[in-house]
Amino acid sequence: MSEYPVPRAIHRADDAVTITWAEDHVGVYPARDLRLACQCAVCQEEMTGRPLLDPGSVPADVRPVTITLVGGYAIRIDWSDGHRTGLYTYEFLLQRCPCERCR
């Protein structure tokens, strides 16, 4: 069994979520990109992975209102558009890290 990566710090801003994975590894995730990447059953068909979320229904200025830790493996984000059912695992977030090192 592989170990999940665990962030050192998670910070919320109006336009982004910043995750510090290591002293020299920081990912700044644009808020709308994260909202559109939600994999919950409301946003994505569970069996096929087909997107259900219409990107046009997500405001350009969507922002994270609160971030809650879920166990030692994920975060849940309450979004300004009222959505709050998705979990973002650390593994999922690290795989999509937008930093230059990971691109």
Image (cartoon, helix red, strand yellow):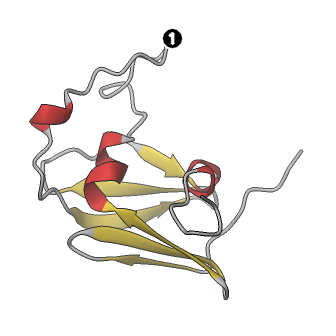
Q: Helix, strand or loop at disc 1?
A: loop
Residue extending furthest right?
1
Give above or below for 48 relative to 27. Answer: above
In the depicted view, which residue is nearer to us: 70 or 57? 57
Total marks shown come to 1
Give above or below for 67 relative to 78. Answer: below
Relative side of 65 to 77, left or right: left
- In the picture, which quadrant includes the N terminus? top right
Relative side of 96 to 22, left or right: left
Picture coordinates of residue 5, whole percent (x, y): 71, 62
Picture coordinates of residue 82, whole percent (x, y): 14, 47
- In the picture, which quadrant includes the C terminus? bottom right
Relative side of 32 to 20, left or right: left
Amino acid carrying mark 1 in the image = Met
At a point 51% along the width and 11% down the height, the residue shown is 47
- Reading the image, the residue beneath label 1 is 47
At a point 16% along the width and 56% down the height, the residue shown is 62
Picture coordinates of residue 18, whole percent (x, y): 43, 74
In the depicted view, which residue is nearer to us: 101 or 95? 101
Residue extending furthest bottom?
23
At a point 67% along the width and 85% down the height, the residue shown is 24
At a point 74% along the width and 56% down the height, the residue shown is 4
Q: Residues within 10 Å of mark 1 (few under 14, many from 20)?
A: few
Q: Quadrant of residue 64?
A: bottom left
Give above or below for 78 relative to 7. Answer: above
Q: Quadrant of residue 78?
A: bottom left
